[in-house]
């Protein structure tokens, strides 16, 4: 079964409150087997408009990645993130 990946590009507006998002999201990430491959590290902008933080999270499957996002646990965290950051997020199936 192919793995699934969250790819998120984020600009944080309130770094102190973003810590609350990270703490709340951990519950869902642990439940759905999330493995962080990139989490806000150094990057090189090649094309388009970059955001300050880039995150890649591996899940056991695409369905697990989607289920994590839609879970009640993550939706609590998502509300916090949406208040304190601007983001684009997609789920991609691995090969």
Image: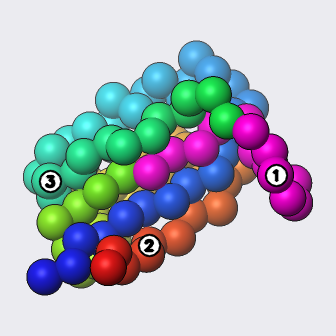
Label 3 Cα neighbours within 10 Å, binned few <14 / some 14-19 / many ≥20: some
Which residues are the magenta region?
A: 44-56
Find the distance from the CA under tag 3 to the CA under tag 2.
Answer: 15 Å
- Asked if residue 85 lies left or right of residue 30, the reply is right
Q: Quadrant of the C terminus?
A: bottom left
Vertically, is 72 above or below 87? below
Per the rendering, the mark at residue 21 is none
The answer to which quarter of the image holds residue 87 is bottom right
Whether residue 80 appears in magenta in the rendering, the answer is no
The answer to which quarter of the image holds residue 44 is top right
- Asked if residue 64 lies left or right of residue 41, the reply is left
Vertically, is 53 above or below 5? above
| Residue indicated by mark 2 | 91
Q: Earlier in the sequence, mark 2 or mark 1?
A: 1
Front residue (pair 60, 83) = 60
Which label lies toward us, 2 or 1?
Answer: 1
Main secondary structure type of the part rendered in magenta: loop
Find the distance from the CA under tag 2 to the CA under tag 1.
Answer: 21 Å
Residue 68 image offset from top left, x and y in percent: 27, 64
Per the rendering, the mark at residue 46 is 1
Q: Residue at x 47, y 35 (%)?
A: 39
Q: Secondary structure at mark 3?
A: loop
Find the distance from the CA under tag 3 to the CA under tag 1.
Answer: 31 Å
Q: Mark 2 and mark 3 in contact (Cβ < 8 Å)?
A: no
């Amino acid at each position: 079964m192919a793995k699934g990946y969250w790819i998120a590009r984020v600009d944080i507006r309130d770094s102190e409150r973003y810590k609350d998002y990270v703490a709340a999201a951990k519950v869902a990430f642990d439940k759905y087997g999330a493995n962080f491959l990139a989490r806000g590290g150094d990057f090189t902008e090649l094309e388009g408009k970059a955001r300050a933080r880039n995150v890649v999270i591996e899940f056991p499957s695409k369905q697990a990645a989607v289920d994590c996002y839609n879970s009640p646990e993550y939706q609590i965290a998502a509300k916090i993130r949406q208040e304190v950051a601007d983001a684009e997020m997609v789920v991609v199936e691995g090969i």
